[in-house]
Amino acid sequence: MTLIIGTRCRDGIVLAADRRRLARYEKGPDTNKLFKLACGVALAGAGDDAVLNEARLFIDRRVREFESESSPVTLFDIVEITSGVVNELVSYYKDRVEEPFGYVLAGLENMSNGVAKLYTVFSAGFSDVPWACLGSGSSYARPLVELLLADGDLPTEKAANTMPTLFTLVSNVQTTVGGGVDICIVKDNQGTGNITHEKEVGLERLRGAVLDAMDLRP
């Protein structure tokens, strides 16, 4: 019951997630689906809320254990740890939860420096991707992401500015998505910024711009 959008930009990565939580198809209190781990990696999950939170705790603990034993640690190491946790929990919760789960991760290749990269992690494996859409709202969001963000030519700030509108559009047609949007920017060679929250927005200006672009103004 989620929408996660991640995209590679001209100067880094933008990762965003909604906050809506459903309990037996009834709207519940908002929940965080996007986190910044202590190691500086941004992590967003789609799927069963309880399982996602359990997975996040395991990932955070194992990353800290790995850091105490190995140096230097890379983003790829964090991805492998996440993949291992996801595989374990998928096996443990098989046939116990209805909704499958997966994660999108963003961070610098060498944790404190290097190019920002984006990964998806599912039980079937992980991939280094230029953009990602996960969750129940992904089928609605994907055409918009392909149109506006998939080329990777926008700076991170402008890409982040599109997220409230994208999430509002999807929430209007997919009621399992909503609660505004949490956004995190990972800048190349700079690191992961703080997570910010934006509310849903009005769409009047967008409608006007589309009408103008298509020469449909009455």
Image: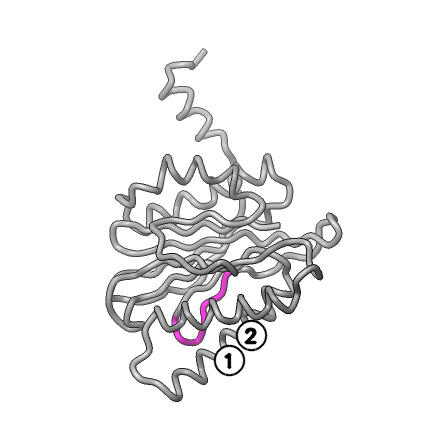
Question: Can you say whether 106 is above or below 155 in the image?
Answer: below
Residue labelled with disc 2? 57
Residue 76 located within the stretch drawn in magenta:
no
Left/right placement of residue 26 relative to residue 142 reads right
Q: For the residue marked with disc 2, what is the amino acid?
A: Leu
| SS label for mark 1 | helix
Residue beneath the point at 43% across and 24% down: 208
Residue beneath the point at 73% across and 48% down: 25
Q: For the residue marked with disc 1, what is the amino acid?
A: Arg
Q: Nearer the viewer, residue 120 or 35?
A: 120
Q: Are the residues flagged by discs 1 and 2 in contact, CB closer than 8 Å?
A: yes
Residue beneath the point at 32% across and 60% down: 117
What is the C-alpha distance between the residues marked 1 and 2? 6 Å
**Quadrant where the C terminus is found in the figure:** top left
Residue labelled with disc 1? 61
Where's residue 139, x and y in %? 52, 39
Residue beneath the point at 61% across and 66% down: 91
Which quadrant of the figure has residue 69? bottom left
Where's residue 89, x and y in %? 59, 68
Left/right placement of residue 145 relative to residue 122 reads left
Where's residue 27, x and y in %? 71, 50
Extreme residue toward the top, this view: 218
| SS label for mark 2 | helix
Q: Nearer the viewer, residue 209 or 66?
A: 66
For disc 1, the neighbor class at 10 Å (few under 14, some 14 to 19, many from 20) is few
Q: Identify the magenta region.
A: 34-40
